[in-house]
Amino acid sequence: MSSGKVVGLVMLKTLVESVGYVYYIAVAKASRMRGIGKLLLEDTMRYFKASSVEEVFASVEEDNEPSEALFASEGFTRTSFSEVSKKHGSLHTLNMYREMLVVPGEVLLRRAIT
C-alpha cells in the first residue's frame, strides 16, 4: 500500500507441508522499478521460512526477463520436471505441477530455504 492505494500483491500457497509456491506477483505499472516486487518476494520467503517450508517454486513466462531476474535475485534457479521428479517422484511432481498450473511457455523456478 502507498498513499492508501494498492501498489502490489503476491499470491502464494503451500503445496504440501514443506513445499511452497509463489503463484503470482504483480506491481502496478506506475509503481514499478521501486523495489516493491523485491519486497513482496522477500516477505514471501520470510513467511515460508516461518512456516517450515523447505523448498519454494515459482513459474514465469519464458520471455519475462524482469520477473525471472526478480526471482534470481532471491536465489531462484530454473528447474525442470525431471529434476523435481528426482527429489519428489514422478507422481508427486505431476500433482504439484497440476496445483501450480504450470503451462506451456512458462519456466519453473526453484529455491531451497535454508
Image (tube, rainbow, N blue to C red):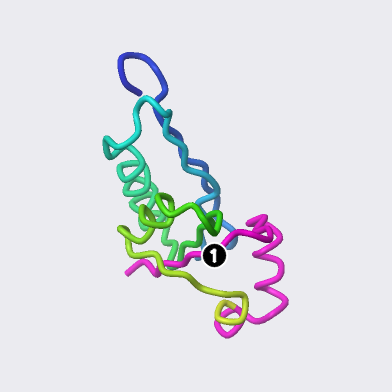
Q: Quadrant of the C terminus?
A: bottom left
Q: Nearer the viewer, residue 82 or 30?
A: 30
In the image, residue 82 sits, relative to residue 63, either above or below, namely below
Residue type highlighted by circle 1? Leu
In the image, residue 15 sits, relative to residue 13, either above or below, namely below
Q: For the view shown, which residue lies furthest in the left direction?
A: 34
In the image, residue 30 sits, relative to residue 34, either above or below, namely above
Q: Position of residue 21 (x, y in %)?
A: 52, 56
* Total numbered badges shown on the rendered structure: 1
Crowding at dot 1, Cα within 10 Å, few <14 / some 14-19 / many 20+, comes out as many
Magenta region = 85-114
Q: Nearer the viewer, residue 107 or 87?
A: 107
Residue 99 horizontal side relative to residue 54, left or right: right
Q: For the view shown, which residue lies furthest in the top direction?
A: 4
The verdict on residue 106 being magenta is yes
Report the residue marked by disc 1.
Answer: 108
Quadrant in the rendering for residue 83: bottom right
Q: Position of residue 82 (x, y in %)?
A: 61, 81
Residue 78 horizontal side relative to residue 82, left or right: left
Q: For the view shown, which residue lies furthest in the front direction?
A: 63
Q: Nearer the viewer, residue 15 or 27?
A: 27
In the image, residue 71 sits, relative to residue 41, either above or below, namely below
Q: Residue at x 42, y 34 (%)?
A: 27
Q: Quadrant of the N terminus?
A: top left
Q: Position of residue 109 (x, y in %)?
A: 48, 64
Q: Residue at x 39, y 64 (%)?
A: 76
Q: Position of residue 89 (x, y in %)?
A: 65, 81
Residue 10 horizontal side relative to residue 89, left or right: left
Q: Nearer the viewer, residue 49 or 38?
A: 38
The verdict on residue 49 being magenta is no
Q: Residue at x 63, y 59 (%)?
A: 105
Q: Secondary structure at mark 1?
A: strand
